Amino acid sequence: MKIHEYQAKELFRKYNIPVPEGSVAFTPDEAAASAEKLGGYPVVVKAQIHAGGRGKGGGVKLAKSVDEVKKVASEIIGMTLVTRQTGPEGRLVGKVLVEQMVKIKREFYLSIVPDRATAKIVIMASQAGGMDIEEVAEETPEKIIKVFVDPLAGIQAYHCRELSFGLNLTSASGKKLITMVKNLYRLFIDYDCSLVEINPLGVTEDFAVIAFDAKVDIDSNAIYKHKDIQEYRDFGEEDPLELEASKFNLNYINLDGNIGNVVNGAGLAMATMDIIKQAGAEPANFLDVGGGATSEMVENAFRIILMDKKVKGILVNIFGGILRCDVFAQGVVQAAEKTDIDIPVVVRMEGTNVEEGRKILADSGLKLETAIDLKDAAKKIATLAA
Ligand code: ADP
């Protein structure tokens, strides 16, 4: 789960990680009030969306007076911000962080992520701060320092020294960086994070080390443990279809293609997506209705896929085990009664009660194509949708 920069900075404060002073505002007047509390200008007004690259997109602005704060905030709040990470459709900005402007002397990059290959936690740092780290990694990977921490042993002094020396810091800021890295690591573990990133990490004239940006992603499977994080969830930032699907316990991820698919079981769903691609088409979603799905869940799965206007055809791939084929077919019929299915649907169904299931579909009067096997099904839907 992603959280906003202002929320991540709240967590940073709890862990004594220095951040510029500031607070969130939902209106230009609130932004002005936030700025006045800071006791001096200029201030920085930053769009709060779940995506980076805001500076280049016009979502981070300097304001030198209270009137300018109001003006800048009214431009940013309500704008559709397009950045490298939002895609061309952009994101509607609903709030800004109003923050003290602090002079930065040098900018660095610092992050912590789990590394699957080594089963360790990797801390990455670079002198190439404030830039797109993906670009640095591609063009000048030697500029990224990586230290690997064994999660059972925890972070050690030598890990921190390696980072501080690697960044060529003076002893005064080096010590501050070490304290910061230790605190950041603690936060990472305590909150079951999948990413903690500071870009830029700034060093000021007087050697202070400050997090100018803060990105914290938390493993969604661990959210139940963290009541404070649950309150950070911003439904406005989530994909509306995925949000709808989560209400019905459907494992649904919206993708870019035009073939919707309804499948039971995550492995089968992955394989189905592969086969759709092999047939020359692109999946519009990942959807696992689950082993113990009810006909209501199936109905909702269809309804959600049909809400997606880019979907030009649906491939149904059900292997009835715990989910019986007749229960599934009932769900399809219910969905058709409530929503017009006006696009081609190809069904491949096998397993428990398959005959009953086929009969329910055949008697329903619905225009469904059946397929003999999965390959045939994928070929048929790719042709029909094209
Ligand atoms: P994004 O990565 O989404 O563009 P950042 O938080 O990195 O957003 O902000 C963009 C740039 O604005 C930073 O690289 C930094 O140079 C500058 N900046 C951000 N916050 C402050 C601040 N409080 N004081 C001074 N400069 C800032």
Image (spheres, grey):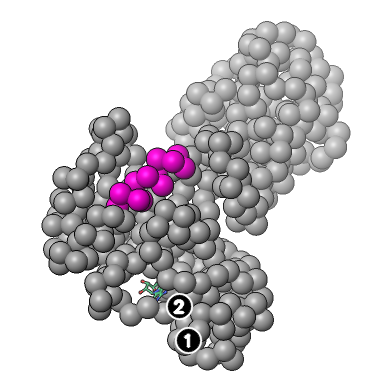
Q: Amino acid at mark 1?
A: Gly
Q: Is residue 142 above or below residue 159?
A: below
Q: Disc 2 on helix, strand or loop?
A: strand
Residue tagged by mark 1? Answer: 40
Q: Give residue 246's position: percent from left, percent from top.
A: 66, 38
Most foreground residue, 267 or 51: 51
Which residue sits at x=19%, y=66%? Answer: 172
**Regarding ligand 1, which quadrant of the image does it lie in?**
bottom left
Residue tagged by mark 2? Answer: 100
Report which quarter residue 366 is drawn in.
top right
Per the rendered image, the range of residues in magenta is 181-192
Which residue sits at x=45%, y=59%? Answer: 13
Which residue sits at x=28%, y=37%? Answer: 154
- Ligand 1 has an atom within 8 Å of the beta carbon of the residue at disc 1: no
- Ligand 1 has an atom within 8 Å of the beta carbon of the residue at disc 2: yes
Residue 46 lies left or right of residue 28; in this view the side is left
Q: CA distance from mark 2 to mark 1?
A: 8 Å
Residue 153 lies left or right of residue 243; in this view the side is left
